[in-house]
Image: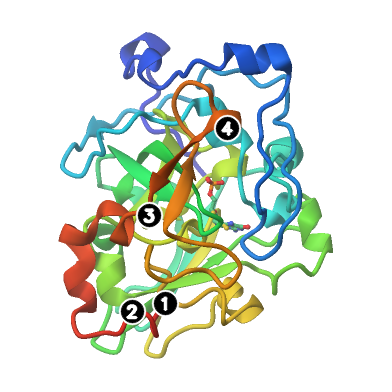
Amino acid sequence: MKQFRVAPMASSEITPESVYLQRRRFLRTLGLAAPLLATGCGGSEPGQAAVPSADETPSGTPLESRRNERWDTKEEPTSWRDATQYNNYYEFGTGKSDPARNAGRFKPQPWTVEVAGHAEVTGRFALEDLLKPQALEERIYRHRCVEAWSMVIPWVGIPLGECLARFKPTSRAKYVAFTTVNRPEQMPGLAYPVLDWPYREALRIDEAMHPLSLLAVGLYGRELPNQNGAPLRLVVPWKYGFKGAKSIVRIEFWERQPATSWNLAGPSEYGFYSNVNPDVDHPRWTQSSERRIAGSGGNLFARRVATLPFNGYGDEVASLYAGMDLRKNY
Ligand code: MTE
């Protein structure tokens, strides 16, 4: 199978990296980066220092994309280093620096995705065929984790809805479920029953079809690093980050609401909808503000900013939930 490469370009041709680079030198000097945070979508443990050898310059295969500024946040992007060193990807461990540290053996190519369920077109598709013929877009989104930290990330991907439409979902397709990869030999975290593996997430079909929903293959103009969900992940910017399933291998159209990993793990803490909502606290912490991991100073002195309903995308998506009690449907 052909390797997935979207028109590699010389680094000099892509968006100036200075846009993404943040001043982290003093942190490097100190040799530390991560703060103490309640960790894991479900637990709490001390944060860990970021992997010290990491470069602050975006690396990996450059991707050609066109900027789509329609929903751009004008906020300062998080540094490449933080975005790729401070992650949640429990298949590689529950600490924030575990994914970057442990994902080196993971092989995201070649890659296929199985499409199943209530659709006219189903089957197994090579990643490059799944993405075709859509042009990659770059979109700068807010990225809000349920643990009350957030980042600003320039994602590269294709609109999820346009991809799904090609499979011609039938009228019975009310939900879309995403299952992620399960490779114990490459993913040390799978040895621990932290979640009911494989990691699963789902959206209502109208949420999936919303033009803000993105199937991401890159960030900062580069292919996704393993720890960020290579080669294919979901980005749903008005929802908490755990809806953003990483390393997707299966997409299935369902008639009934599918079970999802975090909801199974803690139904009172992680609802199916998980729309960012400053008025509905997590049982163990407030959701009214967030620690923004961005800008000079980085994690250690991250600013606290007020959390916005729907993560600031309310004008676009609030109508999807008209008439629903969002305290009940958290
Ligand atoms: N996808 C898989 N397969 N496994 C995971 O543990 N963690 C989720 C989500 N997707 C997770 C996952 C959580 S809790 C968050 S907050 C985001 O990925 C984090 O994405 P980031 O590391 O790129 O910031």
Asked if the residues shown at circle 4 and circle 2 are in contact, with their CB atoms under 8 angstroms apart, the answer is: no
Q: Quadrant of the C terminus?
A: bottom left
Residue drawn at x 35%, y 18% as measured from the top left = 19
**Which residue matches tag 3?**
130
Residue hosting label 1: 330
Res. 299 mark = 4
For badge 2, the amino acid type reads Leu
* Helix, strand or loop at mark 1: loop
Q: Secondary structure at mark 3?
A: helix
Q: Which amino acid lies under the numbered mark 3 shown in the image of this protein? A: Leu
The reply to whether the C-beta atoms of the residues labelled 2 and 1 are less than 8 Å apart is yes
Q: Position of residue 129 (x, y in %)?
A: 37, 51
Image marks 2 and 3: residues in contact by CB distance under 8 Å: no
Residue that label 2 marks: 326
**Structural distance between the alpha carbons of marks 4 and 3:** 36 Å
CA distance for labels 4 and 1: 28 Å
